[in-house]
């Protein structure tokens, strides 16, 4: 479907968005938004960090914005489901990359997918760079999790500077993620040393999404349906003693 009114964050772009198509929950556009982007060939360490950070941001009521690509992007979506916005270079009738099909379909159903291109459009290489300007414009802060020196993520860092967006990076070893290490060394980005403190700067970790998850579980006890909507958040709540899983059903304890 086509959005009738563009999000206010996109109205001042130098290269305007003429149309925006969507699938999913438009209410996510009303939340505070943080982008998490980076390398398609991210390390296991980076992927785990991204999922943890995205999960914490979701838990304070933030919508995590990314690009649906391999590596950093898809892990940002997984960690923040269903509070996530995926901005695609291709039209929304096609799914790319195919290896992310299951997660992307879940985003279509339970989160939000956006594209400025017609539904059947097949993306060209330059479309991915154009897509990045939408991700950054929508977000009040941008986290580049991992990046090489010559990469689309480094071009996104330049866009952050032009749009005056707060830019953050993750801790990385000296000879890995040379792009984010350079951003840090040149004072163009701030380091996230404490994921909980970073997430707490956007809201209270003890509130927000806690209510949404518990409310859903009180209405729907099926493990399969809860997993489809919230992913691994189900097991986080079990570990925290807020729910119990009995076979294929969930019981709320709080």
Image (cartoon, helix red, strand yellow):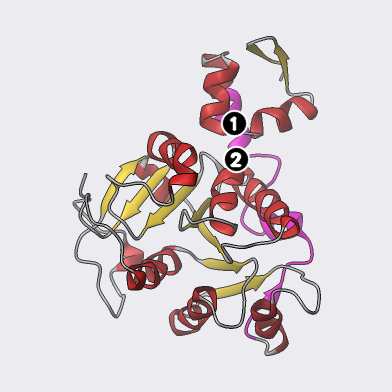
Q: Assign the C terminus to one quadrant of the image.
A: top right
* Residue at the spot 58% in from the left edge and 52% down from the top edge: 76
Residue 201 is one of the magenta-drawn residues: yes
Helix, strand or loop status at disc 1? helix
Q: Which mark is residue 208?
A: 2
> Along the line of sight, which residue is nearer the eye, 7 or 182?
182
* Residue at the spot 41% in from the left edge and 37% down from the top edge: 105
Helix, strand or loop status at disc 2? loop
Answer with the quarter of the image where residue 18 lies: bottom left
* Residue at the spot 43% in from the left edge and 51% down from the top edge: 97
Answer with the quarter of the image where residue 236 lies: top right
* Vertical position of residue 221 compared to residue 91: above or below: above
* Vertical position of residue 165 compared to residue 103: above or below: below
x%, y% of residue 199?
A: 67, 55
Can you name the residue that lies furthest to the front here?
98
* Label 2 neighbour load within 10 Å: few <14, some 14-19, many 20+: some
Residue 199 is one of the magenta-drawn residues: yes
> Along the line of sight, which residue is nearer the eye, 43 or 79?
43
- 116 left or right of 141 in image: left
* Label 1 neighbour load within 10 Å: few <14, some 14-19, many 20+: few
Q: What range is drawn magenta here?
A: 188-215
Q: Which mark is residue 39?
A: none
State the residue position of label 1: 211
* Residue at the spot 55% in from the left edge and 67% down from the top edge: 141
Answer with the quarter of the image where residue 154 lies: bottom right
Q: Do the residues bearing badges 2 and 1 touch, measured as CB atoms within 8 Å? A: yes
Q: Assign the N terminus to one quadrant of the image.
A: top left
x%, y% of residue 57?
A: 62, 51
């Amino acid at each position: 479907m086509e959005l009738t009114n563009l999000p206010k964050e996109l109205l001042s772009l130098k290269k305007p968005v003429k149309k925006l198509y969507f699938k999913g929950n438009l209410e996510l556009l009303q939340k505070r938004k943080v982008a998490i982007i980076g390398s398609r060939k991210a390390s296991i360490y980076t992927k785990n960090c991204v999922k943890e950070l995205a999960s914490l941001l979701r838990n304070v009521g933030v919508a995590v914005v990314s690009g649906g690509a391999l590596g950093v992007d898809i892990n940002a979506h997984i960690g923040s489901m269903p509070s996530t916005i995926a901005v695609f270079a291709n039209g929304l009738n096609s799914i790319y990359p195919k290896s992310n099909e299951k997660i992307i379909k879940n985003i279509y159903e339970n989160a939000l997918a956006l594209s400025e291109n017609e539904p059947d459009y097949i993306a060209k290489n330059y479309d991915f760079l154009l897509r990045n300007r939408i991700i950054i414009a929508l977000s009040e802060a941008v986290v580049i999790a991992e990046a090489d020196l010559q990469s689309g993520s480094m071009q996104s860092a330049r866009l952050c500077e032009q749009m005056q967006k707060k830019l953050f990076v993750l801790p990385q070893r000296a000879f890995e993620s040379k792009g984010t290490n350079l951003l840090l060394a040149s004072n163009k980005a701030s380091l996230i040393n404490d994921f909980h403190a970073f997430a707490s700067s956007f809201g209270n970790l003890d509130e927000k999404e806690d209510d949404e998850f518990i409310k859903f579980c009180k209405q729907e006890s099926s493990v399969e349906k809860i997993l489809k909507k919230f992913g691994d958040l189900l097991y986080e709540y079990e570990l925290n003693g807020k729910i119990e899983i009995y076979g294929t059903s969930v019981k709320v304890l709080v």
